[in-house]
Structures are given as structure tokens and as C-alpha cells.
Amino acid sequence: MDNNLYKEDEYVKFILEIINISLKNDRQLIESLLMINLGKLNKDFSDILVNWLRKTLSEKSEDELLICVAAITIFSEIITDFSQGNMEVNREISINSCEVALEILNSSIFLKNRNLEETKKI
């Protein structure tokens, strides 16, 4: 990880804020949060975000996962277009977030439930 001024728990707090605010789907509010935390938008954040999402979301119910996927998707779209900070890092954060969202949607819990629904139709 980069030699950074922030501790992992500060990044996790920021991640939780992002998820909660992203669910409001308010671009200005999300961009304001990103501006306030501009120094945290770095490689460390990207790595911690992916690891935290994978670990934490593996413990959630299907409904909670879908909510998190929605938040991650909204956040990813906004940070891709965010004009402040390092654009390359912003894109990396967005891509990594989308990859985790796809992993969730392709996870066994969703595949199992899809297979059950298809079986019921037969």
C-alpha cells in the first residue's frame, strides 16, 4: 500500500458514508463527500474498498447485497466522472467497485436463487 496519512478505520468510515449517501442517488451530495475526502481517493482506498466489500458483503443477506450493489453502482458512475483528484485513480476505484458488484451478482447465493426460480417454472 502507499505510504499514506490515513488509517484503515478512517477509510472504512469513508466507505460506509459512501454507501449510505450513494443510496440517496444525489450526485451533488456524493461529489461533496468526495471533495471533503479528496486526500483519501488513492490506491490505498481502492485496495481497502475492494477488500472491505468482499469481506463484509459475504456476510450479508441477498436483500442487503442488492442494496449494496445499487450503492456501489451509483458511486462507481459518479466517481468515474468526478473531475477532482487523480482521474486514473478515480477510474481504478470505479472499475474495482464494478468488479466487486459483478462478483456479488454472480455469487452462489444469486445463482442458487436463479436456479430455484427456473426450476419452479418447469
Image: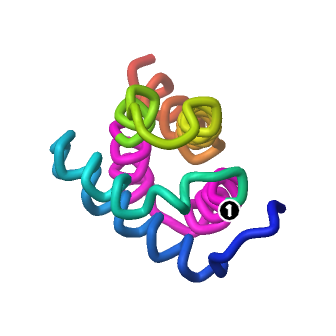
- The kind of residue on which mark 1 rests is Ile
Residue placed most toward the observer, 87 or 100: 87
Q: What span is in magenta?
A: 45-74
Find numbered disc 1 in the image and state the secondary structure of the residue it sits on. Answer: helix
Q: Is residue 10 above or below residue 50?
A: below
- Residue 110: x percent and y percent? 53, 40
Is 74 positioned to the left or the right of 49 in the image?
A: left
- Residue 13: x percent and y percent? 46, 76
Callout count: 1
Question: For the residue carrying disc 1, how many other residues have a C-alpha within 10 Å: few (<14), some (14-19), or many (20+)?
Answer: some
Q: Quadrant of the N terminus?
A: bottom right
Q: Is residue 81 above or below residue 28?
A: above
Q: At 59% from the left edge and 41% from the top edge, which residue is drawn?
A: 93
Looking at the image, can residue 73 be seen? Answer: no
- Residue 85: x percent and y percent? 50, 43
The colour scheme applied to this rendered structure is: rainbow
Please tell me whether residue 36 belongs to the stretch shown in magenta: no
- Residue 48: x percent and y percent? 68, 62
Is 68 positioned to the left or the right of 60 in the image?
A: left
